[in-house]
Image (tube, rainbow, N blue to C red):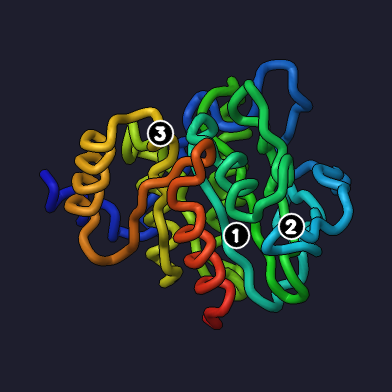
Amino acid sequence: MMQNQKQNLKRGINAWEPEWPVALLSEPGAVSIRSGRSLRPQIIHTSGPDPMSQFPDAKFMLSANAADQFLPDNGTEVAVAGKSNAGKSSAINAIVNRRQFARTSKTPGRTQLVNFFELRDGQRLVDLPGYGFARVSESVRQHWGRLLRTYFEQRESLSGLILVVDVRRQLGEFDRQMLAFAESVGVPIHILLTKADKLKRGKAATALLEVEKELGDSLSVQLFSALNKQGVKEAREVLEKFLATDR
């Protein structure tokens, strides 16, 4: 079974047809996003420099709903992906050390677009859509499948993927699809097993070991908690390493 999982993961994106979950985007009542429709950039974070942050000049740049809305493909950028209830926004805020840098919400799935943030000149963080809960049409699921596949295939500046996974639920089908995207284009991957504070130390360590055994040495995995800051320093070091990598 483990061998089959590894073989499926390494098939690459060419064998994958986008079948996004019924809950791909946001909560019911959010702004509808239709395939092919151009949206104006949406302001997510507008605060000024934060001298306490490791990225004091970090700022939101734009949101994109189509490939032609992406920022120019230069410099380096690290993508962050994860299921909409895995604590992705909280993880980003903890790593960047900026409160509400990526907006958090009690309702999972608020990230609806591909959001570009500048961390430093020529270095970016890209917050990919959280998938999980909102009811969307088949056309929207297909649109997001094509958009994310295009993002991974075309972004020469993409130098790493940080995948956020709830340690209590471990890897799911769509996490593995994101891993396949990144592996197919040779992008290094780091997995954050978030919400480690929700488990006792022994159970968290066991969960970490299980994921490491399943995926082998092709990527790195760590425990993480935005609440008690467990693993924040290590995750930040990985982000810096990816940002310094030239594909």
Q: Secondary structure under badge 3?
A: helix
Residue 27, position in %: x, y? Answer: 65, 21
Q: Residue 52 carries which label?
A: 2
Q: Secondary structure under badge 2?
A: loop
Q: How crowded is mark 1: few (under 14 residues within 10 Å), some or many (20 or more)?
A: some
Residue 142, position in %: x, y? Answer: 56, 39
Residue 139 visible at all: no
**Residue at mark 3:** 197
Closer mark to the observer between disc 3 and disc 2: 2
Considering only order in the chain, which callout, 2 or 3, is on the residue closer to the N terminus? 2
Q: Residue at x 38, y 64 (%)?
A: 183
Residue 237 visible at all: yes
Considering only order in the chain, which callout, 3 or 1, is on the residue closer to the N terminus? 1
Q: Residue at x 51, y 30 (%)?
A: 85
Viewer-side residue, 41 vs 148: 41
Residue lying farthest bottom? Answer: 246
Q: Which mark is residue 127?
A: none
